[in-house]
Image (cartoon, coloured by chain):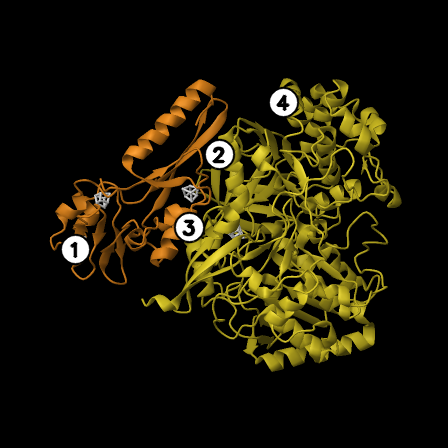
Amino acid sequence: MSEYYIYQDQKRCIGCRACELHCKTENDVRVGPSFGKIINVGPTVRGDVPRINFIFMPCFHCENPWCVSACPTGAMQKRSKDGIVFVDPSLCIGCKACITACPWGAPQWDKDTGKAIKCDYCKDRVDQGLEPACVTGCTTDALKWISPAKSSQVRRERFAKAITEEIPFP
Amino acid sequence: MPEGTKKSVYSVCSMCTVRCPIEVEVENGAVRHIWGNPHLLGGHYLCPRGAAGKVFQNDTERLQHPMIRDGERGSGKWKKASWDEALDYIASNLKKIISKHGGESVVLGDRGGPFTDMQKAFIKALGSPNYFNHHGACSNSVHNAHNAMTGHRRNTVAYDWKNCDYCILYGRNILESIGTKEAKDFIDALERGMKFTHIDVRWNYTAAKADRFLMLKPGTDYALNLALINVIVKEKLYDAAFVERWVTGMKELVAFVEPYTPEWAEKETGIPAKQIVTIAHELAEAKPAVILYQGWMTAWTENDYYFRRSIYMLYALLGGYEAKGGLLFNKNETHTGRKPLRKLVDGVPKVNKKRFDGVGWKYKHLSPDYGLAQMLPYAILKEDPYPVKAFINYRFDPLSAFPDPEAFKKGLMKLDLLVTVDVNYSHTGWISDVILPEATYLERTDPAIAKGGPKPALWLRRQAVEPQYDSKPKWWIFKQLAERLGIGEYFPYNSAEELIEWQLKDIGFQLSDFDAKGYIELAKDQILWDRSDGLKFKTPSGKIEFVSSMLQDSGLPSFPPYESPKSPPKGHYRLLTGKIAIHTQGTTLNNLYLNELQPENTLWINTNEAKKLGIKTGDTVEVSSNGCVQTVKASVTDFIHPDAVYTLHGFGREIPQQTRAYKRGMRDNTLMGGLLTVAVGGNCPITDCFVRVKKAS
Ligand code: SF4
Ligand code: SF4
Ligand code: SF4
Ligand code: SF4
């Protein structure tokens, strides 16, 4: 896991997919591939009301990335300074091994250039002290750019509040 | 990239009619990214359509240059024209029409909203009273109901989400049909602990977040409200002091709701009486910090006007006006002790002619601010009350928005002149004589607008990049036309900058005051009026009139007996339409990225009904009404009322130039034959549409 983490607050997410759009426009991704994607889970009836979750799926920037191990050329790399996993297009030969290797389907295929492309947490923005475009543009402030430790804290606080106030799901 | 080529421009979005404040990141003269304006939104949040403005800007499938029809009207044959050619063509035809039939024979329609001053000035200067907008296909009944009862339109009050404790949404899909700030405010309120009941005929993402979701029989929202009022008055749960001070007609209301008990409403709506009583108690407990959103897409029926009135009556009973957590009056420039922003329309002499659509003489309770676009084809065909010969269609598309486009088109085809000004191809543009391509909202500066609110402000849509293609800003187009028509004096400017400086003169600001944050703040804190003495209801009595003098003037009852909504005939379903976050009706369907996410609509149908018809999710079905048939894929779901079917509005575009959206999905309004009419509230009863559904062979 990189130093960063995109925590998605399901209570705040409305499934609007502005995160996907901000990702696409920021990175000028052509039609077809998408770096960050919302996957709907539900609706399922819980209590009286059908609930739905919208799961945001960018690249997780794994601690031991399968994609990096699979890449024969070193194009897929992990930044030593903060663990962001990205593709160096000048080294990519388009073999697609990374796409096969990633358990979550994160690397994408750019058919125009014949190379792999993927979510790099908008590293140019991160290097300027900004947050990734999906996080910045999210309509309801449901995405948080935080360290893994902080995300755990957010969830614990919420849970503690929920059991004391008996707030219903979710 | 060298630093010097980057800039950031504050402006106002135009991808939908919410018009959010934006910050446009520009790099090397091109749009790099569009964010929300953090000074107004508290962060860079921006809805998906707003973000997708970037690819709209660069789209080769938007209008690129003026076009004059080159063949039969609607043939789709165009010749490219220069601006001079196109403007001369329009001006010479308008002159002919006006000299023969008078200024009133020209009408102008637009999308409504705050950016209408220039259009209103233009049509008035031609000597025509005939401005109208899109609201006849939408919120007319809400505006008119509130206006007749309180002297305020729907949008001269704001919702205080920050302090609201309890909220009811009637078919208002606030988390899918979104505005950036409202969606975020709503989520903030939920996180803060606001309780929320959602009433709808189908489940949606908004329902998914509700504390209570009630699926009611389509069109019976009014019955539910009558029962809520019944409980509230019977148990004396209302805000007696507020009612005593500000309401007239309470006695009549009490007598009227007597028979409409929760038990009665249970039979009508399908919502258990006990639940209705509970909701009434919850409302009373939370009062006045309650928001009852004025219903929306699921209830535009023949007499929904009375339903909308009942919502505002509930507000009055709960003392929800100018109350923390309820409705706050929007204040304007004058409430801050300043003179107002100058308006072009105020400089144009008054027109003393009656309107083509009957508003003001036949329909005294309806507002000329919105008019009745649906009357246009009939006025043209019957020349009643007088000939209408030219229609200037500014960023408006009645053939997509209004029911029964065939009927609408029949009228338009008889015009001597139909001009469309737009950024996109539209169905109405397609049958026009001339299309003028407007520069997009990213390419043009518009006149400044006053943004009313508890904290009023001035906003500015400001040009971020140079126009692509041969498109021109609105201020230029209208000025050019005005000069050719001898009414140039009413457009006293030569550039957008000059116009805005002129607008700002009396109020005491200058253009550069917008630079720092993209808007000009007129009040540091919320301006709140005194609830016991300072409220301003602009009715003859100065109070909230349950028995409305305006309705009386129109010969309409304030409390007609409740009538059940029409039931679908056997084998039919009520067709309802709605929106999602990805699209703005028809106008974004061809957007490269938005189209990628949602290229077509589907037809929602209840699982049991689908079983009877042998329909599974993904099957192609035929939806038909009045001899019109649309085909679309089915989505079978438990979460829609069995009497209804539902689809996203605006799909099934029929303009070949829009290759991504062309013939994708179904075009809902074509099924609404016979509904191009004037319901009591001035809206078209678009939800009184009944369709058959069968599996396509
Ligand atoms: S692409 Fe897949 S494997 Fe590689 S870092 Fe991202 S999530 Fe992990
Ligand atoms: S497609 Fe490119 S990045 Fe992916 S494994 Fe092959 S060379 Fe490496
Ligand atoms: S933009 Fe935010 S609210 Fe919308 S889908 Fe993405 S995470 Fe959810
Ligand atoms: S809601 Fe979205 S599309 Fe509409 S004005 Fe706001 S940002 Fe633009």
Cα distance between the residues tagged 3 and 1: 30 Å
Question: Nearer the viewer's eye, disc 2 or disc 3?
Answer: 3
* Dot 3 or dot 4, earlier in sequence: 4
Decide which of B562, B48 is in the foreground and name it: B48
Query: Which amino acid does the dot numbered 1 rest on?
Result: Ala
Which chain letter matches label 2? B
What residue does disc 2 label? Answer: B637
- Identify the residue at image location x=59%, y=72%: B436
Q: x and y percent of residue B5 in the render?
A: 38, 68
Which chain letter matches label 4? B
Cα distance between the residues tagged 2 and 3: 21 Å
- Disc 4 residue crowd, few under 14, some 14–19, many 20+, Cα 10 Å: some
Q: Secondary structure at mark 2?
A: strand
Cα distance between the residues tagged 2 and 1: 46 Å
| Image position of B619 with respect to B311: above or below | below
State which image quarter holds ligand 1: top left
- Left or right: A128 as drawn, with respect to B172: left
Q: Quadrant of the N terminus of chain B?
A: bottom left
Cα distance between the residues tagged 4 and 1: 60 Å
Decide which of B513, A26 is in the foreground and name it: B513
What residue does disc 1 label? Answer: A75
What residue does disc 4 label? Answer: B282
What residue does disc 3 label? Answer: B597
Q: Secondary structure at mark 4?
A: helix
Query: Which amino acid does the dot numbered 4 rest on?
Result: Glu
Which chain letter matches label 3? B
Q: x and y percent of residue A150 in the render?
A: 32, 34
- Please tell me the numbered disc located at residue B335: none
Q: Colour of chain A?
A: orange
Q: x and y percent of residue B92 in the render?
A: 71, 80
